[in-house]
Amino acid sequence: MPIAINRLTAFLLAGLCITVFLTHTVVQQTTGQSTIQHISKLSKFLPSKTVNRWADLYVSEDDFPETTHMSGVAGFNYFHNLYSANGTFLIVTSNPESLPSYGISGILSALSDPLDKYHNHAPAGEDRIMIVSPQEAKERMLLGKAAIRKSGVSLMFADVKEGTLSSFLNHYYHFIGEMFLGLWRVVTAAGEIELPSRLIYRAESADWRDRAGITTWFQQAVLPEAEIEEATIYEDRKKSGVTFLFDKIAIADRWAAHRIGQEVKYWNKANADLPLLDVPLTWMDPLRDQIKRLALAEGCDVKRKRSKVPVVTYINRQLTSRRLIDEDDQELIEEMEKLDDEGVIEFHNAFMEKLPRVDQFCLVMKTDVMFGVHGNGLSHQLWMKPKSAVMEIMPVNGFARDYAILGEMMNHEYYAIHYNETFPPEKWRKENGYGVDQGPDFHSPRYTIDGKWMAGMVRELVSIRINAIEPPLPW
């Protein structure tokens, strides 16, 4: 009988140990190796509200922490412990020298003068943001006796429509490729990869919802746990008279970037300074993995049909006003189909506007080489594997750096193409440092390309990507 009891005890103990191991660890594959990590480490990928939503919800005056600027460039700034009271953000610090040298001017903007046809924006005044010491905040009673903590990462988009001037948020590239991507980059540049808990808009909903519905799809499908705070919620918070403490918040302001950005002024692109921020190669993985999980759930295969045959996708714009002449488009497709028939590539001639949303993202995730005429579809390069290749067909003698900036941030091999030659970075600038002009045919249906030459470029680019593989999900 004692022997049976001992055996039963040993069996139960073994089962308990296995249960604890399985429920508190996760096997994570990285660079071909498997490592076992405690499951608590997975929380770094999730909005912090899912970890401990109610901890320290109310913060007394005696426990107010100081504000820290974590990372940023002009127009894109990430803070810990930023206060908001009566509609004004307060940077509370006893060490203002720790803030970026550009100060308020590079963080938030005032509204433009309605009589100014150029819509110039001055730095925000104290009605929007101020820098104060803890003592000054207390003496002026700027924060009150307590604050309500807004936990998790908040991403705020400060731009609004002003008269006829759009906020530019209702556009795939200008929202996700500039504003959202910029905020995600400053968060990851601070060494953090926590998905946002909330997105905050100052703009009215009609001005940030894009016609194609990609913005709303992205928010609901890729960030389903993030709260969406529209202008009405911002106004309610302002009118409440309550002080709020954002423990992690990144703020995007297009006009602050344009006002004093380093590279921004040369290219007229709000995100032109973002490549200056150092981030890990895997900085986009948490977002990309979200899309991959959704694609897999819908039954989409993100792997190549043939393991050693790279995937090449042509973003076809022939149904739009900015496109190739028909003859060149036909030759280009014929040359790609020849490469496909040879088994050199797996070719996709993609009219993105005809594909279901998830199918679009599934296709670009497995794409090794993407090319197309300058246009919004090239924003899809954000979801390709790092070190993929992107070729952007430009009108001869014309250039715009929008998608080149994305390529640089994504660590892709990027080429601007003029008919049958590349247009290298050393030619992108004029002698005065400003970017070269777009050219008269930039918005026309008169783009040209040498299909045979492009086939040679594709053959070369895929030859070094035969063994590229889709990285595994972390869990």
Image (spheres, rainbow, N blue to C red):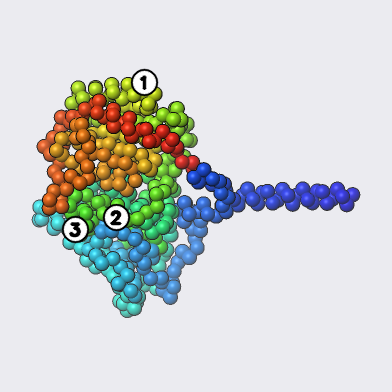
Label 3 crowd bin: few (<14), some (14–19), many (20+), radius 10 Å: many
Residue at disc 3, secondary structure:
helix
Image coords of residue 375 (percent x, y) = 24, 37
Q: Is label 2 or label 1 in front? A: 1
> Residue 410 sits in which quadrant?
top left
Q: Which residue: 41% across, 57% down? A: 191
**Where's residue 72, x and y in %?**
31, 59
CA distance separating discs 3 and 2: 17 Å
Where disc 1 sits, the SS reads: helix
Q: Quick check: 217 above or below 310? A: below
Query: Would you place residue 97 above or below residue 419 in this image?
Result: below
Residue 360 location (% of width, % of height): 36, 33
Residue 213, compared with residue 256, is above or below; it is above
Say which residue label 3 marks: 259
Query: Quick one: 459 or 247, which is closer to the camera?
Result: 459
Categorize mark 1 by other alpha carbons within 10 Å: few (<14), some (14-19), many (20+): few
First in sequence, mark 1 or 3: give its number.
3
